[in-house]
């Protein structure tokens, strides 16, 4: 299945259950944070995470992100590329290569 | 640009800067939580978020999610669809329609 | 200043600014997550955090937690002790000593 | 029980179980974010949270915050008051009264 078809499947899952009423942008933002916490829990005490559990938690975060984009009418590829363009200016290769410093400390 | 090309661009952005050394799965999980918090900040005091700010924060969360999938060798469409399959069993349409209850309270 | 006096100072800070209207339990829960993300950012790329920055972010999380307790009329010592009592049952010393396993895997 | 006695009880709970080895500042920061996500989950779909559940999740966040302070040797009242002092400068009463704007937009 392509990414576009997967996104359509996510939209259909929600509309089939009449969940659109709960999925306001604000509730989706909360849901993304909640699921990000569950993803982080895979690494709570160290770097080794159970792979199957990790897949599910990562999918949950992405699923709500896709729903946020759909709800707001954002084109996912467009917002990703637009942010990469901005990051490329904030983090020029020659200054940021091999450094984890934030752009305002480069 | 397609989603696949966008993902490749994200991988190239990181490798161009030699950031692979910082982007362990654990650090990416922290980064996803951090960015999810920034996304949530758009809604801290109410439902109305600045649209341009929201686009950037959502892109940041998704960018790190894509990097986590790449780092772990996960196929994004596969993990998304596999989780939808599981959710479809947990939340059958007839039982969950119009309800925001968790599956264990349905 | 004692802890009780510090809590009173926090309540006064909010009421002096008429911020009670924004500090609903839901908005405080979002604020705690947002600040927890900023605290986590001190450790985004590794274990060494700037100490002064860490103090401020930890204070921000605790400040909103105290406000949540005040808003809901919870006695902080009571809810802390009541949770420790529950954890002591979930994690008996002999079973959990030296182990980071979750109670349901002990 | 006083707040100070409660904090001592938290320290003893951890040392009794030899958990100090897992409770690095970095792992505690992750734990605070994870528990903040569980607290937020009480409000995922709306403003009404189950009160008993809320008490437990708030206690979990505070418990890890107290452990972070203990681990780093921070005096909780001192860091809270020091941050309130800073906030009082960032948010003077006359400028911030009745407004939820961030200090840099006041």
Image (cartoon, coloured by chain):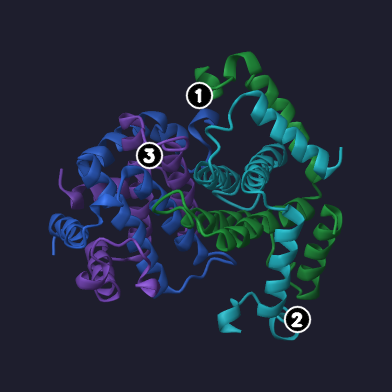
Chain colours: A green, B cyan, C purple, D blue
Which of B103/B30 is in front? Answer: B30
Residue that numbered label 2 is attached to: B93
Chain letter for mark 2, please: B
Q: Is residue B84 left or right of residue D88?
A: right
In this rendering, do the residues under marks 1 and 3 share a single chain? no
CB-based contact (under 8 Å), mark 1 and mark 3: no
Residue at 69% x, 63% y: name it: A23
Task: Say few, some or many: other residues with alpha carbon within 10 Å of mark 1 (under 14 / 14 to 19 / 20 or more).
Answer: few
Q: Would residue B80 appear left or right of A52 to someone viewing this image?
A: right
Pick the quarter of the image with the N terminus of chain B: top right
Q: Secondary structure at mark 2?
A: helix
Q: Say which quarter of the image contains residue A76.
A: top right
On the image, the x and y values in percent for residue C53 come to: 36, 32
Give the foreground label among 3 and 2: 2
Judge left or right: residue A32 versus residue C77. right
Report in which chain the residue with disc 1 lies.
Answer: A
Residue closest to the eye, B52 or D14: D14
Q: Which residue is mark 3?
A: C57
Q: CA distance from mark 1 to mark 2?
A: 48 Å
Which chain contains the residue that carries disc 3? C
Q: Which SS class for mark 3? A: helix
Residue topped by disc 1? A101
């Amino acid at each position: 299945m392509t990414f576009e078809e997967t996104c359509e499947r996510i939209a259909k899952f929600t509309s089939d259950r009449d969940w659109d009423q709960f999925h306001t942008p604000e509730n989706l933002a909360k849901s993304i944070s909640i699921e990000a916490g569950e993803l982080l829990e895979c690494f709570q005490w160290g770097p080794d995470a159970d792979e199957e559990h990790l897949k599910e938690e990562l999918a949950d975060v992405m699923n709500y992100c896709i729903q946020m984009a759909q709800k707001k009418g954002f084109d996912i590829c467009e917002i990703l590329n637009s942010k990469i363009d901005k990051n490329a200016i904030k983090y020029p290769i020659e200054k940021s290569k091999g450094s984890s410093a934030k752009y305002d400390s480069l």
